[in-house]
Amino acid sequence: MGSLKNWFLRLVGVGLLGTQYGPDSLLKISKNLPWLHSITSQGVIAAFALLILACFLGKEWGFHFNPNLKFIKSSNFQYSILIILLLFAFIDVFYNAFISYDKQIWTAFFKYSIDLQKKYVTIASFTAALEPGILEETERYLAIIILLAGFKRYRSWRVPIAIYGSALLFGLSHLGNVGWNGETFEATIAQVIGVMGSGFLWAVLYLYSGKLWIPMIFHFLMDYLANLQSGWNSAGWQFNGWPTDYISEVLMVLVPLAVTVWMMYGKRREVLEENADRLINLPVEFNRYQKINSCI
């Protein structure tokens, strides 16, 4: 994959890596060592392996080696914006983890159920949430740098393409959940659409902070809270066809989408652009070329 130059082929390669590193059932240690058994059988080792590989792939493609950018406070960066993003990410996690609606319309907005159960506080619940938090956010990082580099000559479009494109790929990656522990096709489509909202927020949060571990924590937290309520091997999504199902879907997508659109302007956008440049090691000459063209 390191020799691939075309951005589309790189995305295909990342998809194949996700297929390869996701199911690693052959990596199993005896159940007599429960922590190691759970880490190896549920993909945590593979997730870390993909994260390490992503660093070397980025370097081979000429990008920044470390997805965890060193914090550099520019004149455009605002702590208040970072706090707002973190707040919306927490709200998104809370809504996705605890929404408990029925056929009455108001419940899609105001009915929540925090049903954390002690019996689900297990090693399996923890590692089953840790694996996607690391692996899927690593795939997001790769998608972001590939799209940023692939569309670097379209400076006004590269950041939106990277954010919304990576979220779209994140949502589509859940299509394989059809039939998983009884998950219906309709529920899977709802999941594909619903998780895109979180994908929007996590992509913006990464580009604004430069810290991949931040969206990893939110991703882990969302899955872990779900596991603590229904068990790690339960069906991950429900869809009954009620009006409240559709309202919930809209809220999951449109609220994060509104936040990301707000981030596309002013100093907020400048920080996204600065970190985008740092991620793909964009030459200074290229920046000057773009600024001259924009002035003309």
Image (cartoon, rainbow, N blue to C red):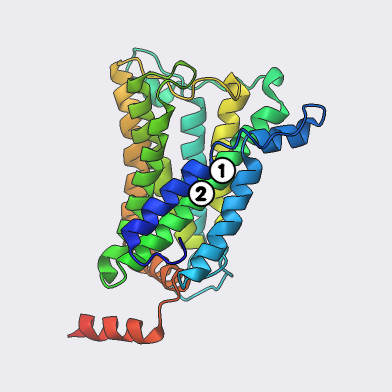
Q: Residue at x 51, y 26 (%)?
A: 98
- Where does label 2 land, which residue? 137
Q: Quadrant of the C terminus?
A: bottom left
Q: Describe the element under mark 2 as helix, strand or loop.
A: helix
Query: Can residue 205 be seen at all in this image of the molecule?
Result: no
In the rendered view, tell whether residue 249 sits above or below residue 146.
above
Label 1 environment density (alpha carbons within 10 Å; few <14, some 14–19, many ≥20): many
Query: What SS does tag 1 mark?
Result: helix
Q: Quadrant of residue 277?
A: bottom left
Quarter of the image for the N terminus: give it: bottom left
Q: Residue 271: x percent and y percent?
A: 42, 68
Identified at 34% across, 45% down, the residue is 168
Residue 226: in sight, yes or no? yes
Report the side of 99 relative to 9 (left or right): right
Q: Are marks 1 and 2 in contact (CB under 8 Å)?
A: yes
Q: Which residue in the structure is indicated by mark 1?
A: 133
